[in-house]
Image: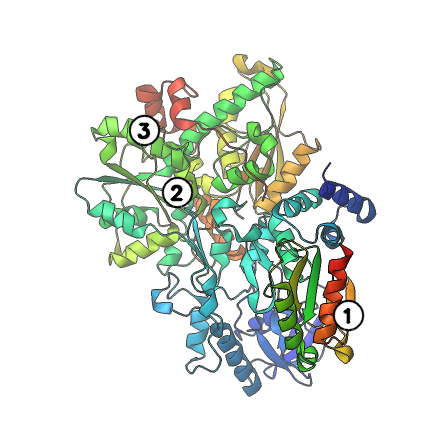
Amino acid sequence: MSEYKVNLKINDIPVTVDAGTTVLEAAKKLDFKVPTLCYHTDLCIAGNCRVCVVEQVGAKTLIASCATPVSEGMEIRTNSKLVRQARKHIIELLLSEHNADCTKCYKNGKCELQDLASEYRIGDHAFLDLVGGRLGMVDELSPSIIKDDSKCIRCQRCVKTCAEIQGVSALTVAYKGDRQKISTFLDHPLVEVICTNCGQCVNRCPVGALVEKNYVDEVWDAINDPQKFVVVQTAPAVRVAIGEELGYEPGTRLTGNLVTALKRLGFSSVLDTDFTADLTIIEEGTELLTRLKKVLVEKDDSVKLPMTTSCSPGWIKFIEHFYPDFISHVSSCKSPQQMFGALAKTYYAQKKGIKPESMVVVSIMPCTAKKYEADRPEMRSSGFKDVDYVLTTRELGMMIKQAGVNFQNLDESPYDSIMGESTGAGVIFGVTGGVMEAALRTVYEIVTGREVPFNNLNVVPVRGMEGVREATLKIEGCQPEWDFLEGVELRTVVAHGLANARKVMQAVKEGKSEYHFIEIMACPGGCLGGGGQPIPTNPEIREKRAKAIYCEDENLPIRKSHENPEVQLVYEDFLGSPNSHLAHQLLHTHYTERERF
Amino acid sequence: MTDVKKIINRTIREYGKERQALMPMLQAIVQVKNHLDDGDMIAVAEALNLSAAEVFGTASFYTFLDTEPRGKYIIRVCKTISCHMAGKDEIIKVLEKHLRIKVGQTTRDNMFSLLTVNCLGWCHKGPVMLVNDDVYPELTPKSAIEIIESYISRK
């Protein structure tokens, strides 16, 4: 809040705002909508698309409202004849360089440029169509993301997302003038460069130039094949976001309706990634305690601390590219999605008497990187591809609409068993800090025999939307076998968004921070802000989804992973003990050093 | 140590390791090698802790930072309107014929590359061309060929 106030008039209505407010924000305050394209609340101002131009009385030229701060006595017109004409021309110019084959576009109906063209009734061909030479430049080699340059309007949201939020800069603006394009290093395919597949660019692309690779038809084919037993798993963050695809307000919890809808779509069994999230906590918690013991007691140099989480496939690819020397710091645990796949085609198949070769495992994920993860050669521990198809929250929304399922009228159903039971600790995997909180709930209790010393199990210090959050937990009153941890201050840090991950890793690399345990999620807000989540995703919407996740946690009867009865069962009946030989074979993995371009 | 590594280290000593060292570093490499190859851009990215894509983005923006191999002498003929009106097409035609290459190509002995560029700021003395860093204004088809010949005899 600035102490300086500025008075201006927008369309003759006076308004007083803080100094530094942009004209766009001031107009919004008066409920005047000014169209935007390159503008995004997650990114710094670019002002390059010009769609948001408005008239400032007395000024020679129109101004970009997103990039102009208010000034005293300013008079703005957001809808004068001049503005309307200019805006229409700008949209026409953008369209002249855009492959406007809208009916066949993946983003049909969900395209910001299409919406604007529709609002302004762009009809006649005022400008030459310059698309020609750009056609055919489609990069479809990545299992996660499709990049179609013919649809790109070069607003550069993707470039800024990749640089500012993720600190990756896999995308850049290359060349200039009419040859200007969004490019990777030497225009290599996305799959061959440092792209982490996080899909944050996909979530922000206003048009269809960057979209997820869609596997909806493959999944329908599996469902319609009577020989196939199609199992579906749903990630924690999907249940608090799917509603946005179907007309609900952000932050609506729809777990029960989601399960019913998946059953109506025809999946043979509807199960929960939260189950393997709980399992991850047991495996990863055990790994952390083992590492602590090896480092603190046995002084084993080959074992590395701090240990980092491994649930986020964007983070995994990031560290493989940028910090390959630190790969041994990453937990060997597979992500919950992949633990699920490996168990589905072994444990579940045995228990239910289903041949694993007839099983198809589908994941509903808030994520595009999960598609790449499922394709990794390491992810075939069951003897088959552990997870066959990964759909984003958006693709699921599409399937529900295609199937004509009236979501709003559905009754709630529980997940099927086995591998459908979960705890509050599993649900909070969907929010930044959640894996840390779930791990602390379990690890602290294993070591001390007491619950974490926080009111109602809510480990508040690791929560929130601050990019990097440190928290220290003093361990006291240890059980005899863990007495080497008596008095140890467990130093943890949580980061979300890869630019923040880089800050943490840089501190670790330079020896500035002595953490024991690091949680990193590639996407801002954690999975709830994933690249596969409904568009738009912005700070306000992330807050609402986070609130819904914590609400879901508080409303579950069991809130600690180690108390999940189905997790206890899988150890009794199948895995033996945490980090057992079989657990290692199915639930753990290794990582690969990758090039840095 | 490769030449490029030496250039990078020299530029870092002069300009530091921040992003603003990028342009001088790229220019210094082009000065010596006439172009930037994939490995050069990756090496620069690593030295300045930038992404290779960013380095490529910068290099591809500037006409004078070539990302394709070029000959020892790069001929750049101005293609902008004043030089166009002063007869640059004729100059290009005789150069193409004399060197037996088209615009954008390099002679087989790697001596000359023929390129066109936007305004060089010599509108009053067009048509104009550059051979590496040397400016040749008020060209005629005859003088253009004589200039090229003088470079051939230099080798």
Asked whether residue A372 appears in the rendered view, the answer is yes
Decide: is A252 above or below A326: below
Residue A188 as seen in the image, left or right of residue A138: right
> Do the residues bearing badges 2 and 3 touch, measured as CB atoms within 8 Å?
no
Decide: is A245 above or below A87: above
- The three-letter code of the residue at mark 2 reads Ala
- The three-letter code of the residue at mark 3 reads Gly
Report the residue marked by disc 2.
Answer: A235
Return the mark for residue A363.
none
Report the residue marked by disc 3.
Answer: A383
Report the residue marked by disc 1.
Answer: B136
Q: Nearer the viewer, residue A273 or A314?
A: A314
Point 31% across, 32% down: residue: A384
Tag 1 secondary structure: strand
N-terminal-most mark, 2 or 3: 2
Residue A97 location (% of width, % of height) = 49, 71
Quarter-wise, where is residue A496 in the image? top right
Tag nearer the camera, 2 or 3? 3
Q: Quadrant of the C terminus of chain A?
A: top right
